[in-house]
Image (cartoon, rainbow, N blue to C red):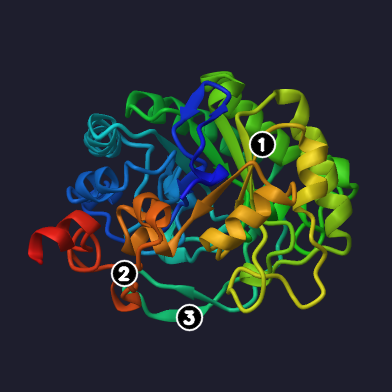
Amino acid sequence: MTSPLFEPITLGALKLKTRVTMAPMTRSRAVAGEAINPSAATYYAQRAGAGLIISEATQISRQGQGYPNTPGIFSEDQVAGWKVVTDAVHAAGGLMVAQLWHVGRVSLPDYQPDGGAPVGASAVAAEGQAMRPDFSMTPFVTPRELTEAEIEGVLADYAHAARQAKAAGFDGVELHGANGYLVDQFLRDGSNRRTDRWGGSVENRARFLVEATRALVEVWGPERVGVRLSPTGTNNGMFDSDPAGAFGHAARALKPFGLAFLHLIEAEPPHPMAGPEGSPRLAKDLREAFGGPVMLNGGLTRVSAEAALAEGRADLVSIGVPFLANPDLVDRWKVGAELNPADRATFYGGGDKGYIDYPTLKDAAKAA
């Protein structure tokens, strides 16, 4: 069946064969030293039919980690592990960018290099519970507010991670500015209570987003950099008094860079990424403000993905759980085939079960 979803699209220097991309999905399977696990090469190569693969969130420093067994990209061993993955994806005909991540206050002393408090835009604790290294849950702690000098250090960490991603063979990078992590903590007034040049007005609160983006662009050029935002998401207790104003400003501030894409999460209830009932639908306006390609994410099906393109809310889409359970998702969508159900018990941690053993249509045909 023909559909605009399966048409090619160019994002800066990235030439995608389809507008269906694989969303970043944490799998918590990193090995010693927070290096990506060996089976990840198979996992990602199996999904190279996506127009673009966005890696699972990858911390830019030890300080930036907040979950068990998530991979980093700041050490040489981590780079070597990722190089095996990108080589496998390229050999399978795919494209892959690294999603660069600092969780900020969504961490625990357990993960911090000095065993101290995690850092944030302000000393305001996230709501809910954090996950310890043993996967047990505990209430979030109050973070320590980053000093201005430390902010510059974190921006340097983003630049270092961008260089590491290039050495690892990625095709570009995405700044993780969504879901209540550090970039988001600076941008929203619910978590940013600063009174210096990094807080207060929306221009000041957006400064960290802009400068982190600049750090990546200076390494990669704008044509291989994307940014992910979640304008109405409430993950980790996030909120803003004026999301349309804050994220409209953010989109306009990013426009001059000429980035490859803006990646927006705008799910609808009952999806867990959805904002509260009555949240504004901002994707269309933000696409206009940004002026470049917009990728939409949030529980999309083939039907709702096509509607998003037709309604002008997006130029392409990213798909999470269905890609996790269906390595050949694009082929299945093309022919209207039934999808494999996802085994949620194997989403996080564990081995190859629920990771690289989901069958493709070709596998099913061979077994028949």
| Frontmost residue, 264 versus 98 | 264
Q: Is residue 127 above or below residue 94?
A: below
Callout 1: 10 Å neighbours few (<14), some, many (20+)?
Answer: few
Which mark is first along the chain, 2 or 3? 3
Which mark is first along the chain, 1 or 3? 3
Q: Looking at the rendering, which quadrant does residue 259 occupy?
A: top right
Amino acid type of the residue that numbered disc 1 sits on in the rendered structure: Ala
Q: Are the two marked residues, 1 and 2, in contact with CB atoms closer than 8 angstroms?
A: no
Q: In percent of the image, x 80 and y 69: which residue is there?
A: 279
Q: CA distance from mark 3 to mark 1?
A: 30 Å
Quick check: can you spot residue 219? yes
Residue pointed to by mark 2: 340
Q: In percent of the image, x 56 and y 30: which residue is there?
A: 225
Residue 60 is situated, as x and y percent measured from the top left of the image, at 46, 42
Residue pointed to by mark 3: 138
Q: In percent of the image, x 45 and y 33: which residue is there?
A: 161
Q: CA distance from mark 1 to mark 2?
A: 49 Å
